[in-house]
Image (cartoon, rainbow, N blue to C red):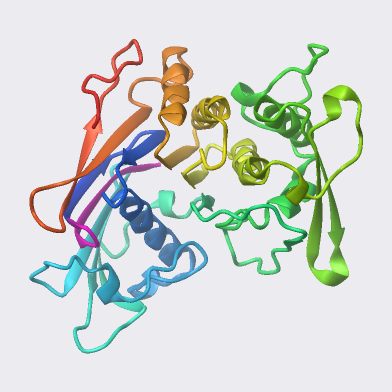
Amino acid sequence: MIRSLSLRNFKCFATAEAAFGQLNVLAGANGTGKSTIVQALLILLQSVQSGALQRNRLQLNGPLIDLGTGRDVLYKRSDEDSFDIFIEDEQRNARTVVAAVPTSQSQHNLEAVIDPPDAGLDCLQQQVLYLSADRLGPQKSYPMNLDDAVSNEIGRRGEFAPLLYGRSRELPVENERLILETEEKKQFKDLQTQFSLWMRRLFPGFEAHTQDLEQLDTVMLGLNLQKQIGEAQFFRPSNVGFGVSVAFPIILIGLLARPTTTLIVENPEAHLHPSAQSLIGEFLARVASCGAQLFVETHSEHVVNGMRIAFKNSILKGDELRFFAFSKTDEYGSHRVTPVLLRESGDFAIRPE
């Protein structure tokens, strides 16, 4: 698990630091730095998983995130041509990455000094599932993931979700706190059953069907929201509510998450009714309760309230659920990250702005 992160001269932050738990919620107005925290994590993760960091390079563009050049990510009022990212795991193993930003040219991969050079950070080697705010909406067909080197099996836009669902639906769901009962009060722990049950909580009557078209390297997805009234016909995603396609990969990766998974989701509330937003907040809290570490960027009070209800119902403990409020400071171009504590009642100790 990632225990803490500190930044210096990175994007909108002169300095910033945060101590994390199992479920970490990043909230605040637009342009206050929420995505910057996520992006700092992602460039470290993709730099380690590609082997770049082991070669003293920081990879700004890759399968998880594209940030451009070093000049794009350097804090605009920095007096130095470098930025620092400090990360610590739960065993208090720590690593500082100091990336040099050349003034004479724009480089996409930066030379970096790693201190200590041989720090063993298992939290950067674990499975990463990342869904960006720019998720894929309804499509006529979905691509197959043809690159085994891409660790983000879902695709950062959720584009591989139908393929992953079709190939994983017989797998068991390992997190007992995610197991729902059928209408007949029976428990089936396979992914296909649990995925349908969770999606039906958000979208009554939900059912899904996939078909691989190997010669075209694509997957067809059929959706049905009429199961409760006996209609068995599947429709193109474009003929079913937009929110169904956007929520599809979130529920899928939550059910597939293992205790060693790092799961990053931006704006899980997109295109969802407020009641569904609250339910997806509860769902993500239950995913974190199995030991997976989640980072959730959101603008939705309903998502936050779903998580607070899960906390009050003892699904998560006090130190496992952490909220961070992001805001601008009086200094031009600098921003602030403020931890916001919860009382036992689930209320905020100080109401974030």
Is 88 colored magenta in this rendering?
Answer: no
Instruction: Look at the image and tell me in which quarter the N terminus lies.
Output: top left
Magenta segment, prevailing SS (helix, strand or loop): strand
Please provide percent x and percent y for residue 28. Answer: 30, 40
- The residue under the point 16% across, 58% down is 333
Does the image show residue 216? yes
Above or below: residue 304 compared with residue 26: above
- The residue under the point 67% across, 46% down is 245
Please provide percent x and percent y for residue 285. Answer: 49, 28
When asked about the image quadrant of residue 231, the answer is top right
- Left or right of residue 303, residue 11 in this image: left
Q: Which residues are magenta?
A: 1-13
When asked about the image quadrant of residue 294, the answer is top left
Above or below: residue 310 compared with residue 335: above
**Residue lying furthest bottom in this view?**
104
Please provide percent x and percent y for residue 180. Answer: 69, 20
